[in-house]
Image (cartoon, helix red, strand yellow):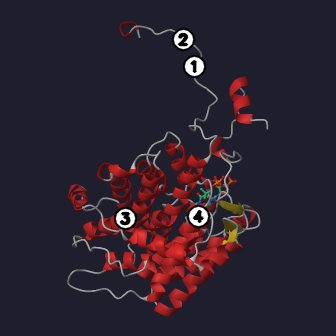
Amino acid sequence: ALDISRLRAQTGAITLDEGFVNTGSTRSAITFLDGEKGVLRYRGYPIEQLAANCDFIETAFLLMYGELPSTKEIETFRAGIREHTMIHEDMKAFYNGFPRDAHPMAILSSVVGALSTFYQDSLDLDDQRQVEISIYRLLAKLPTIAAYSYKKSIGQPFMYPKNELSYCENFLHMMFATPASDYFVDPDFAEALNLLLIVHADHEQNCSTSTVRMVGSSNANLFASISAGISALWGPLHGGANEACVNMLEQIAMDGGNVKKYVDMAKDKESNFRLMGFGHRVYKNFDPRATIIRACCDKLLAKLNLDDPLFVVAQQLEEVALRDEYFIERKLYPNVDFYSGVIYRALGIPVQMFTVLFAIGRLPGWIAHWREMHANPAFRINRPRQIYTGCTERDVIPLESR
Ligand code: ACO
């Protein structure tokens, strides 16, 4: 078969596609999405079916290993994860060094990067057993690292994981229990969290996943590659949008709930303001993930019967924007981040932790792509080209004559 990239490299031809709108960076068998039709499938399974029938850990297994697990496989997988939920005691010292108001995403990427200093026995990419252990370690430890960052920010002691709990229950326990008081995990909260993690678990070649692949393509270890992905996810145009969205809703609520004013501002290019949680690079009709979690959001809000002006603003904003010509013409619909922020808030998760939860959800997707890339015998270091637009050749004038 004709290898276009090799041919281009030989002939010097370069395709310029700023922002990679139409550039395929790889072949991948993990996630299919059709932005026009609003279709999202992991390994061929529709996201709606996975959300209705599977839990996050089964979904993680599916993404990483290609098939839904059997009963025996999932038991072994869960047991393997449980075995690694604690982090090395000395790693707690990192948290002493971070300022109390440090953003948890900064802590998350730093501590995940630092896993490679503590777990040097799982860094050899040529040893499949070591790679597998690093995968278990990441899946097991990320919630612990994340919950510790929250405990640090509020000055409470870290809570050790409780391995008899499920993945989501355990995270909520580490977030909200204290040594003085146990925390009852509401099954509806655990279910909502489970759903959110599933819908965030993969989304093909998005910014953070492409970052994980890019960094991983230099043969950097898995911890380093995932740490880079976490940093990429932090940006407000990517995973940071759920936090930015709730901050925006709060601002609108404090400003008297004048939704129309903000919709008008978003339409005014001079304002540089965008409605956070609206629009998507790929989904141009609706975001199937948003549809799934919108139902969860409605159910949770009805159950909790919360009197929160932010929820009222969210509902009004959705209504006004969906009827506005500007948003209709540009096919700007609420994306997954619009509702996820509202759900996290209802669960009592502090706003700075929203993107951290996105990272926990996206982890299996990042790992799946990293594995897929390394399993490809034709894999090469990722190295895009550019069109140079700077000066043509010129001579250096010595400093004293400039
Ligand atoms: N509010 C107002 N206008 C918008 C918005 C918005 N949220 N999103 C896009 N537009 C407008 C743009 O100004 C542009 O208008 P124009 O054609 O008149 O110039 C048009 O819609 C197309 O927008 P682009 O920026 O070209 O679209 P792109 O695909 O590059 O960006 C993105 C997609 C980044 C998601 C964008 O819609 C956005 O900034 N949304 C808000 C942030 C957000 O919610 N991000 C989360 C994405 S989902 C995720 O990461 C899980």
Q: Which of disc 4 and disc 2 is earlier in sequence? A: 4
| Quadrant of the rendered image holding ligand 1 | bottom right
Mark 4 and mark 1: span between their CA atoms?
Answer: 47 Å
Q: Which of disc 4 and disc 3 is earlier in sequence? A: 4
**Which residue in the protein does label 1 denote?**
391
Q: Amino acid at mark 2?
A: Arg
Q: Amino acid at mark 3?
A: Lys
- Give the percent coordinates (x, y) of residue 196: 53, 74
Instruction: Specify whether 290 is left or right of 143.
Output: right
Image quarter of the C terminus:
top left
Residue lying at 39% horizontally and 64% vertically, measured from the top left: 142
- Give the percent coordinates (x, y) of residue 151: 27, 70
**Which residue in the protein does label 3 denote?**
141
Taking depth in this image into account, of 346 and 150 the one nearest to the observer is: 150
Q: Which of disc 1 and disc 3 is earlier in sequence? A: 3
The answer to whether mark 4 and mark 1 are in CB contact below 8 A is no
**Which residue in the protein does label 4 denote?**
63
Q: Give the structural element (helix, strand or loop) at label 2.
A: loop
Determine the residue located farthest toward the right in the rendered image. Answer: 1
The answer to whether mark 2 and mark 1 are in CB contact below 8 A is yes
**Which residue in the protein does label 2 denote?**
394
